[in-house]
């Protein structure tokens, strides 16, 4: 997971060397979490990169910025182009693309509006987020003692840097206790999501995922997997999930740009289903990975070729 520098970073309209992409200690984002970001993957399709759901990610970035009153000085199309260009100039065939909008220097006050808004695009290499074996073997997770934010504290559906302090608490606790990841409950005690992933449950052949009302990020991979599940003929439902429903599920899995589609084999040391990847999860993984590897046709128009 260590960052390996690439050559160039796009910052405020210019491609600059990695080592020169620095900020001053006084930037507002560093003190108060006032940054908005996206995580996007570019997949290697026959030796050339193609960016997955770029349009949806940039749309979500603009929506997050709107909530926090951050004016991006570029059009969505220009920012999409900046992502494409940054992958291209760094010669990457697959990449994790990190568009980042942040409040710069201007005030020590909490009100961020006197601070200029900067926009950057960083590209790095990213392997399997939850470990190399996770995709096949699944991960062991716990229910976090930290809850997800209530809707009137932070907007879960705006991807703001400061909110990830909650994710950091969840993740640290999980790893310290020997788990790969944590699942948090929402403020009403229903299952919400992982520290950086959405959650799915399979029960009696039905694919279920918590609704937006459970303080989740409206994941783009979540949306794609719901589409793929429907394509395969499954009934897909957004429903409140309780903690004990996790333990008794036939299958559980995470979705996310970083985690892709990762099976969950245990929760709080209780085996889920047979204790390994279930058949529906595997079928959905195949459907997903076939598209992002180019083995299946991109029938939903999710891929933006870089060249
Ligand atoms: C808290 C949280 N939930 C869910 C997701 C999954 O969202 P997506 O599929 O858009 O990457 C992410 C990753 O961005 C996340 O950080």
Image (cartoon, helix red, strand yellow):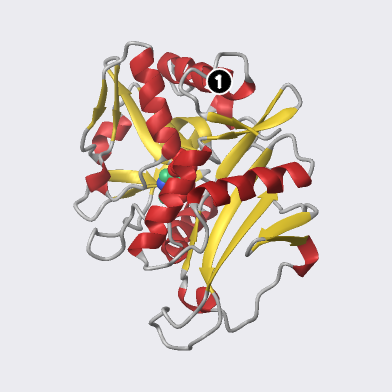
The quarter of the displayed image where residue 198 is located = top left
In depth, the one of 117 and 238 nearer the eye is 117
Q: Quadrant of ligand 1?
A: top left
Q: Is residue 125 visible?
A: no
Q: Can you identify the residue that label 1 sits on?
A: 291
The secondary structure type at the circle numbered 1 is: helix
Q: Is residue 231 visible?
A: yes
The quarter of the displayed image where residue 292 is located = top right
Q: Position of residue 20 (x, y in %)?
A: 77, 69
**What residue appears at the point 76 percent right and 52 percent down from the top-left corner?**
4
**What residue appears at the point 42 percent right and 54 percent down from the top-left corner?**
62
In depth, the one of 48 and 190 nearer the eye is 48
Question: Residue reaching furthest bottom?
Answer: 108
Q: Where is residue 188 in the image (x, y as percent from the top left)?
A: 19, 52
Position of 290 relative to 197 (above/below):
above
**What residue appears at the point 37 percent right and 14 percent down from the top-left corner?**
231
Would you say 265 lies left or right of 82 here? left
């Amino acid at each position: 997971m260590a960052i390996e520098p690439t050559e160039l970073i796009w910052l405020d309209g210019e491609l600059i060397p990695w080592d020169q992409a620095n900020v001053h200690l006084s930037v507002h984002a560093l003190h108060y979490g006032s940054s908005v970001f996206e995580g996007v993957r570019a997949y290697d399709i026959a030796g050339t990169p193609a960016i997955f759901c770029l349009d949806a990610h940039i749309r979500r970035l603009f929506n997050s910025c709107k909530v926090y009153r951050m004016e991006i000085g570029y059009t969505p199309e220009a920012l999409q182009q900046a992502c494409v260009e940054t992958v291209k100039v760094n010669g990457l065939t697959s990449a994790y693309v990190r568009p980042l909008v942040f409040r710069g220097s201007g005030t020590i006050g909490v009100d961020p509006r006197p601070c200029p808004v900067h926009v950057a695009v960083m590209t790095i290499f990213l392997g399997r987020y939850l470990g190399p074996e996770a995709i096949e073997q699944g991960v062991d997770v716990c229910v976090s003692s930290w809850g997800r934010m209530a809707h009137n504290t932070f907007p879960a559906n705006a991807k703001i840097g400061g909110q990830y302090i909650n994710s950091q608490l969840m993740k640290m606790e999980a790893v310290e206790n020997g788990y790969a990841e944590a699942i948090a409950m929402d403020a009403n005690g229903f299952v919400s999501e992982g520290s950086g992933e959405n959650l799915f449950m399979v029960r009696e052949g039905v694919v279920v995922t918590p609704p937006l009302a459970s303080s989740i990020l409206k994941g783009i991979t979540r949306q794609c997997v719901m589409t793929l599940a429907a394509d395969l003929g499954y009934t897909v439902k957004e429903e409140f999930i309780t903690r004990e429903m996790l333990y008794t599920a036939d299958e559980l899995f995470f979705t996310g740009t970083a985690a892709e589609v990762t099976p969950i084999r245990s929760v709080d040391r209780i085996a889920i289903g047979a204790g390994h990847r279930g058949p529906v999860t595997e079928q959905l993984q195949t459907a997903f990975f076939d598209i992002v590897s180019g083995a299946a046709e991109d029938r939903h128009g999710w891929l933006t070729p870089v060249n």
